[in-house]
Amino acid sequence: MTETRQAHGDDTGGLRNGTTTFEALRDQAVALRRQGLSRRQIRDHLHVHDNDILTRLLEGEPPPDWTRRPNAKDDLRARARELRLQGMTYDRIQLELGCSKSSISLWVRDLPRPDRAAKPKGTDMQRAQQGRREAYERRAKEYAATTRAAEAEIGTITDRELFLMGVALYRAEGAKAKPQPYINFTNSDPAMIRLFLHWLRLLGVDEDRLRFFLQIHETADIEGAEQFWQEWVGLDASHFGKTSLKKHSPRTNRKNTTDAYRGCLSVRVLQGAELYRRIEGWWCGIVGAVSEGDHKKRT
């Protein structure tokens, strides 16, 4: 059944005054579309400027490929369909591509569902765990590389640099109670203890003035820890006081229970009241040297 339809105003050109039937105009629009013309070109060619009417004229006719804008997800869509045809589930496709399940469903819903009996070995959970392990190993390698590069940037340390580091280290970690008849530095990090001892040697502190006191949980390898610290500081048991044992409730959730746990070692300098006062003065000097008014004096 043919029917002459009038356009609104002058928007449809050829449909004005009923001179052209809708079907005839549609035939022209379809022919132009199949020649590869865009909507704009067909509109200008037929003088049809009403979008609703133009849409009706082109209904069912796909746009030419050249008019389609590139879609960033086209490659993902194609890959998702390929994986679905290989028998993968939505979960596995999501793990492979990192896109949402809703997108995957839209892309592959016309494809046949995979045969569950033919599902490859290895569950989705195993694949996820493998992915996490690989990501962890990759981050660990990056961390190690960054650490090595940063270590190489330090180079050699001058006596003055060691002196300043030691002052700051004691100010941060050392005992600061007053009055203080000696200086006392406690830490569980062997490298920190060794740095502190290097600093004391730089200050001319004699080994006879050094005393060490171990604090450790009663469930740890106490004898092994005592032997470790004696070897680490390079002094025999005569320099070590009585080990202090820490008690804890069975309900305590301790995390320092590995073989690397050796307690905390306190380094005490006897007759250290004068040294303590000098440390305070050195620290005040450092603070003053980095004040805003002295920036230009630093080299």
Image: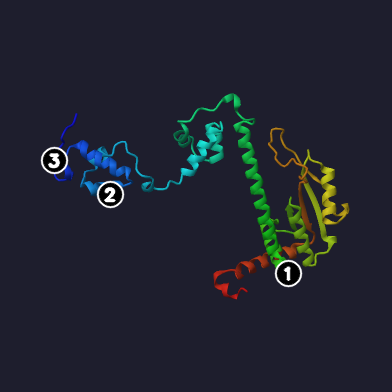
Q: Amino acid at mark 2?
A: Gln
> Looking at the rendering, which quadrant does residue 145 occupy?
bottom right
Q: Is residue 249 visible?
A: yes
Helix, strand or loop at mark 1: loop
Could you tell me residue 186's position as x and y percent? Answer: 73, 53
> Looking at the rendering, which quadrant does residue 115 occupy?
top right
Mark in the foreground, 1 or 3: 3
Question: Dot 1 surroundings within 10 Å: few (below 14), some, or many (20 or more)?
Answer: few
> Relative to residue 59, is residue 100 drawn left or right?
right
For the point 38% across and 48% down, the residue is 66
Residue at the left extreme, as displayed: 17
Residue 158's label in the rendered image is 1
Q: Earlier in the sequence, mark 2 or mark 1?
A: 2
Q: Amino acid at mark 3?
A: Thr
Residue at the bottom extreme, as displayed: 297
> Looking at the rendering, which quadrant does residue 205 occupy?
bottom right
Q: Is residue 177 visible?
A: no
Residue 41's label in the rendered image is 2
Q: Earlier in the sequence, mark 1 or mark 3?
A: 3
Residue 24's label in the rendered image is none
For the point 88% across and 54% down, the residue is 236
- Give me the C-alpha separation between circle 2 and circle 3: 22 Å
For the residue pair 252 and 65, the one nearer the viewer reads as 65
Q: Amino acid at mark 1?
A: Thr
Could you tell me residue 246's position as x and y percent? Answer: 75, 41
Q: Which residue is mark 3?
A: 19
Q: Earlier in the sequence, mark 2 or mark 3?
A: 3
For the point 51% across and 27% down, the residue is 113
- Circles 1 and 3, Cβ within 8 Å, touching? The answer is no
Helix, strand or loop at mark 2: helix
Mark in the foreground, 2 or 3: 3
